[in-house]
Amino acid sequence: MKKDTSAVWKQAIRTGLIGGSIVLLLALVGIIGTFKGRDIISGWISMGQILFLAPIFLFAYNAARRAEAPSKVGTILVGAISGLMSTSIAAILYLLGQIINLRAMFANASPDLYTMLTFGQGPLLGVIILLLAGVLIGAAGAGVLLLPSRIRKALSQAAIWAILLGLLRELLMVVISRWGVVAYLIRWIFAQNGLAPHGAIVVFLIIGAATYWSAGRKRVAINNLPPQQKKKRLVITLVVSGVVLLVLPLVLGIFFSEILDTVGLYILMGLGLNIVVGFAGLLDLGYVAFYAIGAYTVGVLTSPELGLFHLNYWQAMPFAVVVAVLAGVILGLPVLKMRGDYLAIVTLGFGEIIRILALSDWLKPWLGGSQGIQQIAHPWLWGLELKNQTQLYYMILVGIAIAGFIAWRLKDSRLGRSWMAVREDEDVAQAMGINLVATKLLAFAAGAFFAGLSGTIFATKLTAAYPHSFSLFVSINALSLIIIGGMGSIPGVVVGSLVLMGSPELLREFAEYRYLVYGALLVVMMLIKPEGLWPEARRRLELHEAEELAPGTAAQPAPNNAGQ
Amino acid sequence: MAVLVSKKVTKRFGGLEALAKIDLEVKEQAIHSIIGPNGAGKTTFFNCVTGFYTSEEGEIFLGDRNITGLSPDRVTRLGISRTYQNIRLFKNMTAVENILVGMHPHLKSGLFGGILHDPRTMREESEAVAEAMRLLQFVGLKGKGDLMAKNLPYGQQRRLEIARALASKPTMLLLDEPTAGMNPSETQEMVYFIRQLRDELGITILLIEHQMRVVMSISELVSVLDFGQKIAEGTPAEIQKNSRVIEAYLGRGAASGLGENIPVAA
């Protein structure tokens, strides 16, 4: 299909300008500066440079893809123009920076940034090089489009892996220090700072070749497999992932266990919130309240500091969960008639009320006020005190397994269908004979159950509960991870939690920009992939039935005149 | 014998009287139509019967039972089921799941059954799915069960909505403009299908319809509403000749000149 040529150029220019604006944003916010010191390939390229170049490259690729230019030269040209536009924005930033002092407004518009933009050359030569680089990078981005898709896949996978390995070098070093001989092999690909150049080549070759090979194989979707094979594959997957999860903290060590614990607690919370928001469609912004109630109840019941009760963790935990569930029902009752935005506002208030109560002087004798509760008991199991990150990891894992199982079973049950019907259309759901009161309260209670459980583990892990641990951001994190993972999807909760809670822990530099990245990620997700990273899959009942029922009994032959 | 009786049902919205003392009797296993110009109160009447609205005055009986003011879920459990003027399926659920939700009142499993999968729950679920398959076949949607409701074409969505309504095993079905937006051949299929519902399943049918050709060919009795009042009732032939009905549809001037020429396929 031929497009109007002027429209194609306009498109290329526009795409390039957007890419340039993103570079501008990354630079002025300071992300590029933060990562400047992080070499990906030692002495060759740093993460800062990648963050500077990648948007230009990707947007040029995109511009070329959309343009659908008939000739190869045309495609490359579109990419080059897009790239030129992107870097011209950077050039304007540089020139502007020479004339007026941008630093008064943007602390990150530093001489260092300007040096990077001009590749260390003078003003005139630097700008020319910058623009030329834009043309080349843009052309390269468009050039990738001309490659066969197998090679393209191999290249992109290899690049992603190289960047990941380079970024996570330090953490990997800590991990592999326990691995003996393997450690030597892996160390060989790294330099003091990032990947060694020869290491980068090796990674590129290995990952690229592996991707190239696997992309050529025919894949059969698991749903289209014959049932026995499907079952076999499912069992293998479960066993393998089970074993991996069990040995993970032993292989990775304490630091990673700590991260996994945080991620795990959010998975547990997310599984609960997923029932409330994802299944039943009740937008709950005060979800942290139940997490806090779980934590504080365990604190009150076990802490000798308060001296109110002297239960151990296992005795206190059921109480804490029950209290959280009751709180869920109590919150549920007044909001039964509310929908959408109104519900969100009221639940938001509820979350804040709980936090402020915990902080108040009024309840200080019981909840400890701003000092919180210390000396919360660790759980004991067969004479062993579960106190370090690895031990607690297993406890959280068991919690997730139980919660995941319950959520998975409920999803396809009569109750799960009622929840989804309420989410889709409350009035019609009621007209189908669904009792709205019971259905909504059960959703709130189930959500509170998991959050309460998660809160008890959080309290015992910290051996303390402070009011400031239960701010609104916990609710927002939990909600964001569900949206990123995919509303109503159970694997989506795990993926979302790993991405949102895990990656900032791995990349400490990012922690500063956490909420900026969240916001950007949410917007991008809504635009590009609104169903989430791992969207919910509906169960296929009809196929399933056809296999199980013998042909004679499959369906009573109801005469069907309609349609003839 | 009358299945559904409404006695002087009145519904007001602010100062507007949407329904004024509507008396209506629907005979068992009848196909009874309600017609009337836009805004006459037809759907409001449906909403009063099914418990979406509570009428200010009057009473509604299902058999001997007074159902005035009951909530929609209770009314459904007593055997009245409905479809909607603008299709209201659960869009992000599959066709089978839509029907399974319709079966809700007849299933028993609760929270723990759903989690533990005890034998009773499993039996109930597999029977429910089998029944849903039968309903799918009955409405001519065999093979579409695993599609999302929103991905079905318009005509099939209408059928699925009826299948969902049938899933609650109603004694009475309220259809709100089942042929709206359909082409003539689809409409013809729907007419057959509605007859089939009555003849084979013995369900009493009350329907709101705009296409006069449909109303005249299918109904045994037609009630006409205009500005919230019942202005006429009778067999299709009687209604076609009724001057008040013609007036309501075409205005006073037209009534004298046009005689029995009621707008066909409005």
Image (cartoon, coloured by chain):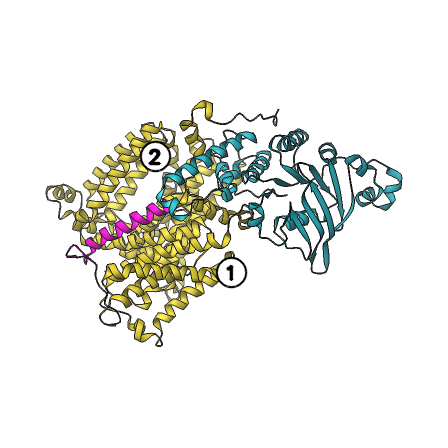
Q: Position of residue A508 (x, y in %)?
A: 27, 56
Kindly indicate which chain is depicted in cyan in the rendered structure. B
- Is residue B88 left or right of B147 when viewed as pictured? right
Is residue B62 at least partly visible in the picture?
Answer: yes
Same chain letter for marks 1 and 2: yes
Chain A shade in the render: yellow
Q: Position of residue A19 (x, y in %)?
A: 42, 48
Report if the CB atoms under discs 1 and 2 are less than 8 Å apart. Answer: no
- Is residue A269 left or right of B106 when viewed as pictured? left
Secondary-structure class at tag 2: helix
Outermost residue on the left side: it is A181
Secondary-structure class at tag 1: helix
Residue A33, quarter of the rendered image: bottom left
Of pointers 1 and 2, the one earlier in the residue sequence: 2
Outermost residue on the right side: it is B256
The residues colored magenta run: A379-408
- Name the residue: 32% across, 52% down: A268
Which labelled disc corresponds to residue A342?
Answer: 1
- Is residue A329 left or right of A431 when viewed as pictured? left
Q: Is residue A493 above or below residue A557?
A: below
Chain letter for the residue marked with disc 2 in the picture: A
Give the class, few, some or many, for how many residues have Cα within 10 Å of label 1's Cα (few <14, many ≥20).
Answer: few
Quickly name the residue at label 2.
A152
Callout 1 amino acid: Tyr
Outermost residue on the top side: it is A552
Callout 2 amino acid: Arg
Q: Main secondary structure of the magenta part?
A: helix
- Cα separation, mark 1 vs mark 2, equals 48 Å
- Name the residue: 30% across, 48% down: A402
Q: Is residue B260 above or below residue A113?
A: above
